Amino acid sequence: MNFLFLALWLIACQDQTAETAQQQVQELFQLEKLPQRSTVNAKGVVILMDWKEFNDFNTSFDALYTVANTEELSLVLEDLIEKQKQLEGGPYPAVFDVPQIRSRQRVLKTFILKTKAAVEYRIDATDAATEMVEAYNALRNQFNTIVNNTLDTNLIIDE
C-alpha cells in the first residue's frame, strides 16, 4: 500500500515539474510576442548564400523561434553569441563590408547580450528578445537597402 502511494506521489510530482517548467518559460519569455523576421530580397539572397558565417548565424537565429524552456533559450543565446563572434571576425562580402552593416551588427550583439542577461537574472526576456529581433530585422533591411542602391557615390565625390 505504501509503495502504491509513493508511486502515485512521484507521478504527480513529475506532472507538476513539467507544468512548472512550462509556466516558467511563459513568465520569462513569451515566444508568441516576438516579431516576424524580415525577408531579404533576391539580390541580397544571392550574395548571402556564399557568406558562410552569416548563414551559420542565421541558422542559430532560427532556433530562437523553437525554444520550449529557459534552458533551451539560454543555449540558443550562447550559440548566437558564438556565431556572432565568428560573423564579426570573419570575412564579409565586398558589397556588405561597409560601416552600415557593421554598426547594425554591433547593435544586434548588444541586444543578444541584453537578452542573455535577462535570462540569467531570471527576469522577463520578452522585451529584450523583441529588441534583438528588431535589430536583426534592421540588419536584414540594410542588406536590402545596399543591394537596391544603384547610386554610384564616386560620381558625387568626383563632382
Image (tube, rainbow, N blue to C red):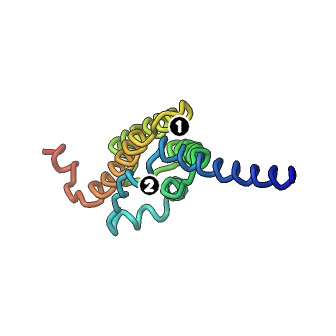
In the rendered image, is residue 92 in sight? yes
Residue at the top extreme?
121
Within 10 Å of disc 1 (Cα), the crowding (few <14, some 14-19, many 20+) is many
Residue in the picture at 39% in, 65% down: 45
Q: Which amino acid lies under the numbered mark 2 shown in the image of this protein?
A: Pro
Q: x, y percentage for residue 131?
A: 37, 42
- Residue 148 is left or right of residue 86, and the answer is left
In the rendered image, is residue 79 in sight? no
Residue at mark 2 to residue at mark 1: CA–CA distance: 33 Å
Within 10 Å of disc 2 (Cα), the crowding (few <14, some 14-19, many 20+) is few
Q: Which amino acid lies under the numbered mark 1 shown in the image of this protein?
A: Val
Which residue is label 2 attached to? 93
Q: Which of marks 2 and 1 is nearer the N terminus?
A: 2
Which residue is label 1 attached to? 119
Towards the viewer: 104 or 16: 16
Q: Residue 85 carries which label?
A: none
- Residue 55 is left or right of residue 13, and the answer is left
* Quadrant of the snapshot with the C terminus: top left
